[in-house]
Amino acid sequence: MVTTAPASLLQPRLAQLNADYARALDDDRLEDWPGFFGDPCLYVITTADNHRQGHAAGVIYADSPGMLHDRVAALREANVYERHTYRHLVGLPAIVGESDGLVRAETPFLVVRIMRDGRMDLFATGRYLDVVVDTHGALRLRERRVVCDGNRFDTLLAIPL
Amino acid sequence: MALPDSARRWPGATLARVPYWVYQDAENYRDELRRIFEGPAWSFVCLESDVARPGAFRTTFVGEMPVIVVRGEDGAINAFENRCAHRGALIALDDAGTAKHFQCVYHAWTYDLRGALTGIAFEKGSHGRGGMPAGFCKADHGPRTLRTANVHGLVFATLSGETPPLEAYIGPEILGRIARVLRKPVRVLGRFVQALPNNWKLYVENVKDTYHASLLHAFFGTFRITRLTQGGGVLVSADGGHHASTTINRPEDRTSTAYREQGIRSEREGYRLLDPSLLDGVDEFGDGIQLQILTVFPNFVLQQIQNCLAVRQVVPRGPDAMELHWTYFGFEDDDPAMERRRLKQANLVGPAGYVSMEDGCVGGFVQRGAAAAGDQVSVVNMGGDGAESQETRATEASVRGFWKAYRRYMGY
């Protein structure tokens, strides 16, 4: 059963979803990250330029929960990168549309990257363009398009945004 | 860091030793910009489809030189320095667009689509006073122009009159490998810039280094996308500068189901893809080559990893920094299934690529590891000390080829 709550009730729930999402990534609980998504789902990291021009490719493109889990497994077991963490600051979600039990929200974010030697850099800013589904009282991401403001990624992007 | 000239000596004739100062020395870096990027070499600047119609332009770089590439009214592709002849300001400020002419924002000097200076604001002064001297000839002033040439939808530019014709420069063998991939009109799927914390040559060497692929990149080895035991080899151009490495799928691996089964039974215990559709490639070129990496000296990479296609442009940004400009593409006639396949496989490459992310950091590891070793040398000896084509990828032949070409340009 899909229910839609009034926007006034949804915003704090969306904010909580984002807060939990950011804490999972920043606390290195990557295994929890796929759980924020529904099934089916779409997760794409792209840039404002690509988004504006309708270019569909992302630096990460996952269109199934399995691909999200695979990303985490690759980061844990296969990929080589220097140890680092993120600190997400996620703004308030703006609800920009609702229909058929789906909520569209847009939320700004800022991510600081902390390297193992202590260096801190502003790694990414942008907005989450989300389609959220409210199923059995729980909000899940049907779509999260991470639209980075800049088109430049420093060195590599391992941990999801 | 700048070493005295006497310290910039090459350690002997062998191609199998490379001194670390070559990645560090500021003066050497400035020489590279003059002798290579602004010298008799062709630099990749954009796709022909980026400047499809008259007036369509892109701004890019040849070495550190900002460049405008624009399709003229006559259909020719022009390239000129993105520098106003007056005070040196950038003429075009956007990455791409369409223009009838270009006008510098600083003092409104205007240029046509060939880069010729056509207009000077207040050239005659105001109320009979000021203005340019009577003898000032606009035709004598303009940004430097570059020759352009295109092959198979790729546009290259060179500042030097001595650069050989592009097709001769690349050579028939490597040209054939380009034609293999770029055989029909392309459609751009995305563009990304990756800033790398290393000298540009460390990245070019990495791309040419067939030896590292299955060793550094556990993802490749685990899922049998490339292994040194698989078929294939490396083609090195006669001058050493260009290369194409290939991995040929063994017949038993050729179907996507074989891939899936092997993908799931990984070599690393417990590591499996929950969604192996990432690796559901099709043999779109009909030759069993599932991976081809190709370089044209000094700044161009063409990549085919299964159905994931991209060009990468190397942009130097000082002795210890560079940018990699990625353009992912498919073909205009791709059906939705093929586009989706390319989007999924793009997870392998780029700043977050299961494979490429490691190439993004390993150059920095060398840059930092060798920080105090300017007078020491690295060892490039796999497969001997020559730079000829080899039917194995357990070799550093194409890396040595790079140094063969590099030393000729630099006079080392």
Image (cartoon, rainbow, N blue to C red):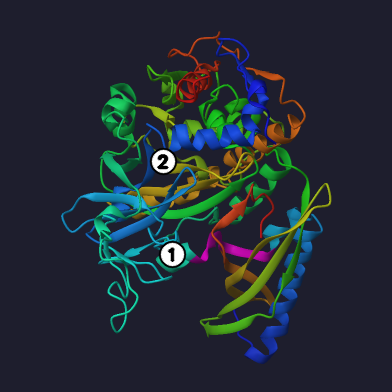
Q: Residue at x 63, y 25 (%)?
A: B5
Q: Quadrant of residue B51?
A: bottom left
> Magenta segment, which residues?
A36-48
Q: Nearer the viewer, residue B279 or B310?
A: B310
Comes first in the chain, label 1 or label 2: 1
Residue B210 locus on image (x, y percent): 53, 23
Query: Is A40 part of what is drawn in magenta?
Result: yes
- Quadrant for the N terminus of chain B, please: top right
Disc 1, SS: loop
Q: Nearer the viewer, residue A19 or B380?
A: B380
Residue B32 locus on image (x, y percent): 51, 33
Residue B381 locus on image (x, y percent): 60, 12
In the rendered structure, the answer to whether residue A11 lies left or right of residue B134 reads: right
Q: Nearer the viewer, residue B40 or B343?
A: B40
> Nearer the observer, disc 1 or disc 2?
1
Q: Residue under label 2, please give it.
A: B307
Q: As shown in the figure, which amino acid type bears the numbered disc 2? A: Asn
Task: Count residues near mark 1 (Cα–Cα under 10 Å), then give few for <14, some for 14-19, many for 20+.
Answer: few
Q: Is residue B74 above or below residue A82?
A: below
The chain letter under disc 1 is B
